Image (cartoon, grey):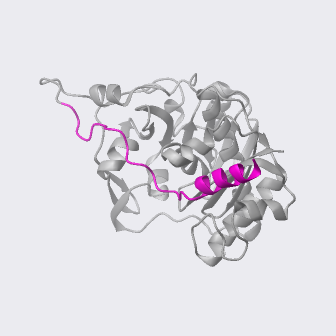
């Protein structure tokens, strides 16, 4: 029986982070019989907080469960108590500059988590290119065909909404909101610019490790959020599995490879065994060069084999390890 599980582990570990071809999605704004689609507005909810003082977020949402650092200068105020109301508010210099919405009951009008992509294309202008003018220069982002169908952008007032689409259901999995400067900092699409790029102060070693730990926590939160969405039980955090995951992320970073098998430390079974983790079933997801841990998690959701691992009902434990822009999830079910 154990050999069966090891064979299953080998099959899971064979797949790298390469998104599967998406189901058919609109790649052009549909015709509207002469009706002009107008830019949507938001007078309430999370979208209306972008650019506003952080205290307004507290009035609307209360005190955050925790505050996480990010690699982009802002702090994440994380509201994670209930998956259906999960939201992260990015605060820089006392102002809301970004937000990440995953909870299906969060007011993120004119959008909604779970909303069909077709509805968005039919009711509001979706941008295929974005030009942003700041005092530091002019920035033009071009969306590829895949971007346009899986990470489309809609402008709402002074905010930009990046809609993460679950390509297996054709619905909105999450919404990332940004002001113009944050959009340029994150550089989420192919960019041509004139001027200079807004920079973020380099992080110290300690600051970077704190950001890594924050990304690991957020990946854990979002994994359970998505499991709840699909009717699965929550995973429990395991420190030893997290240690194994962190070591693998650092190993990939330091030795410049991207694989489930380390030239020095071996495959997942070997890496878990060194830490005396006994399992009947184990699996691993890896990602690299994503904007942050949340984007890595949505990427796994949109890759067939990674989605199968993340939404496997038999797993009970998860450890997450991040090293700069390398991300590893180690799942297992103990003996």
For the view shown, which residue lies furthest in the left direction?
A: 34
Q: How far across and how far down the image is residue 240, in percent?
A: 83, 55
Q: How far across and how far down the image is residue 294, in percent?
A: 58, 47
31 lies left or right of 198: left
Task: State whether the magenta stretch is mostly helix, strand or loop.
Answer: loop
241 lies left or right of 176: right
Nearer-the-camera pick, 141 or 136 = 141
The residue drawn where x is 33% and y is 45% is 148
Magenta-span inclusion, residue 20: yes
301 lies left or right of 281: left
The residue drawn where x is 58% and y is 75% is 256
Magenta residues span: 1-30
Nearer-the-camera pick, 34 or 269 = 269
Magenta-span inclusion, residue 77: no
The residue drawn where x is 55% and y is 43% is 307
Above or below for 324 versus 6: below
Nearer-the-camera pick, 93 or 185 = 185
Total residue callouts: 0
Classify residue 220 by image quadrant.
Answer: top right
Q: How far across and how far down the image is residue 290, in percent?
A: 53, 57
Tell me the quadrant of the picture where the C terminus can be found: top right
Nearer-the-camera pick, 221 or 244 = 244
Answer yes or no: is residue 327 visible.
yes
Classify residue 41 by image quadrant.
Answer: top left
Q: How far across and how far down the image is residue 128, in percent?
A: 28, 46
Answer yes or no: is residue 96 visible.
no
Above or below for 259 versus 295: below
The residue drawn where x is 34% and y is 59% is 139
25 lies left or right of 115: left
């Amino acid at each position: 029986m154990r050999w069966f599980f090891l064979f299953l582990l080998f099959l899971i570990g064979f797949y790298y982070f390469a998104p599967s071809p998406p189901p058919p999605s609109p790649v052009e704004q549909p015709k509207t019989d002469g009706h002009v689609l107008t830019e949507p507005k938001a007078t309430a909810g999370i979208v209306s907080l972008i650019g506003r003082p952080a205290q307004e977020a507290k009035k609307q949402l209360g005190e955050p469960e925790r505050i996480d650092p990010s690699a982009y200068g802002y702090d994440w105020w994380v509201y994670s108590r209930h998956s259906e109301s999960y939201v992260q508010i990015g605060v820089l210099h006392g102002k809301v500059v970004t937000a990440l919405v995953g909870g299906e009951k969060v007011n993120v009008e004119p959008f909604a988590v779970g909303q069909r992509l077709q509805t968005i294309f039919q009711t509001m202008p979706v941008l295929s290119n974005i030009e942003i003018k700041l005092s530091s220069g002019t920035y033009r982002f071009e969306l590829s065909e895949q971007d346009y169908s899986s990470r489309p952008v809609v402008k709402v007032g002074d905010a930009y909404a990046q809609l993460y689409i679950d390509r297996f259901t054709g619905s909105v999995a999450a919404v990332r909101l940004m002001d113009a400067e944050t959009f340029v900092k994150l550089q989420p699409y192919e960019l041509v610019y004139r001027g200079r790029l807004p920079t973020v102060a380099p992080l110290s070693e300690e600051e970077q490790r704190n950001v890594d730990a924050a990304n690991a926590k957020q990946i854990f939160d979002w994994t359970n959020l998505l499991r709840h969405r699909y009717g699965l039980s929550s995973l429990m955090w395991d420190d030893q599995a997290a240690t194994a995951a962190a070591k693998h992320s650092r190993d990939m970073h330091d030795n410049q490879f991207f694989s489930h098998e380390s030239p020095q430390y071996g495959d997942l079974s070997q890496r878990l065994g060194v830490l005396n983790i006994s399992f009947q079933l184990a699996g691993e997801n890896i990602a690299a060069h994503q904007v942050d841990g949340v984007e890595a998690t949505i990427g796994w959701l949109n890759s067939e084999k990674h989605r199968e691992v993340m939404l496997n009902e038999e797993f009970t434990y998860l450890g997450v390890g991040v090293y700069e822009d390398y991300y590893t999830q180690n799942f297992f079910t103990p003996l």
